[in-house]
Amino acid sequence: MKKYVLRRLVISVLVLLLVSVMVFSLIHLIPGDPIDYLFADETLTPEIRAQYQRDLGLDQPLLVQYGSWMGRVVRGDLGMSLQMGRPILNLIAERVPATLLLALAATLVAVVIAIPAGIIAAIKRHTSYDYLFMSSALFGLSIPHFWLGILLILFFSVFLDLLPSSGYRPLWSDPIGSLEHLILPAITLGTSMAAVVARMTRSEMLEEIGKEYVRTARAKGMPERRVIFRHVLKNALVPTLTILGIQFGRLMGGMVVVEYVFAWPGLGSLVVDAVYSRDYPMVQALVLTFAVFAVTINMGVDILYRYVNPRITLE
């Protein structure tokens, strides 16, 4: 186990290094100059523009800029936001609670919907329940986040006036208000995740049901409920756990759209604002933060395999 964890840590560092190189290179291909956005209402002389470029380090070759940026990142300094003039680490720390709350709520929505749907679809294979749940999963997988979010706002906020259409309230200061603001974005974000998890759960359940140990358990007279929930489901949840981990990491990408639609003050909306304002240090830091989340979650899921199913060995 220790060797496996150490190897995964080394691989994770290499992945993050590659991500940092890619995002640093791609962000500088975006048309526009951050100085133009910082001083859009002012007329800058070439001398003043050159001075700002030197102050921001934009006059240096890209390789030198990357080395300087990575040197600060390794020391825990993500730099200053060009748009807000504040330390990026502080801005991310302020937005992380809202993003994590939305991600956990979306995951809860997905699990509550997907696991029972996948189990019922597998047990009732080729029945109306199976067709209904799998058709719903296909619909949830196909519908875009932004479109579903707008539909939910129109129905629950505009027509029925039951839930707020946008905004955020901290859970610890206003639990009821926070949950009211959380419902629509969590459903929007958790729908596609639920679709993938439900299909995977059904597929793995059917594969386990057809194995020899299930037929043996049934032949011994073991109750069907015990066969399904004690043996089949336990083994089927191992690949499902993988999908949950991968989908949780992918939630960070989906949040960019969902948070913007619902005016949710998380990391996703911060990315959009940073891209629009050509805030290079902010975009680089946020993409690297998303990569750290994804890599950490995937590694954690792999390690969790051993505890979910002791037969799995990690080498």
Image: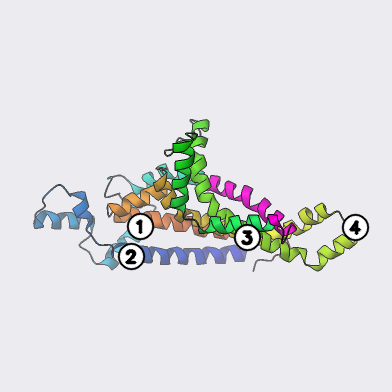
Question: How crowded is the residue under tag 2: few (<14 C-alpha within 10 Å), some, or many (20+)?
Answer: few
| Dot 1: element | helix
Q: Secondary structure at mark 3?
A: helix
Question: Tag 1: Cα neighbours inside 10 Å, few (<14), some, or many (≥20)?
Answer: many
Q: Of tags 4 and 3, which is closer to the observer? A: 3
Q: Which disc is residue 221 wearing?
A: 4
Earlier in the chain: of badge 3 and badge 1, it is 3
- Which one is in front in this view, the residue at disc 3 or the one at disc 2? 3
Q: Earlier in the sequence, mark 3 or mark 2?
A: 2
Snapshot quadrant of residue 35: bottom left
Q: Amino acid at mark 4?
A: Gly
Residue found 69% across the figure and 56% down from its top: 128
| Residue 288 position in % (x across, y down) | 41, 57
Q: How many marks?
A: 4
Is 274 located above or below residue 172 in the figure? below
Q: Is residue 134 above or below residue 269?
A: below
Q: State which mark lies toward you, 1 or 4.
A: 4
Give the labeled residue for mark 1: 284
Which residue, given by chain and number where applicable, does mark 2 sit on? 26
In the rendered image, residue 57, in percent from the top left (x then y), is placed at 23, 58
Q: Earlier in the sequence, mark 4 or mark 3?
A: 3
Disc with the residue nearer the chain's start (2 vs 1):
2
Q: Which mark is residue 199?
A: 3
Q: Secondary structure at mark 4?
A: loop
The magenta segment: 103-129
Which of the two labelled residues, at mark 1 and mark 4, occupies the earlier sequence position? 4
- Magenta stretch encompasses residue 99: no
Residue type marked 1: Gln
Q: Earlier in the sequence, mark 4 or mark 2?
A: 2
Magenta portion: prevailing SS class: helix
**C-alpha span from label 1 to label 4:** 60 Å
What kind of element bears circle 2? helix
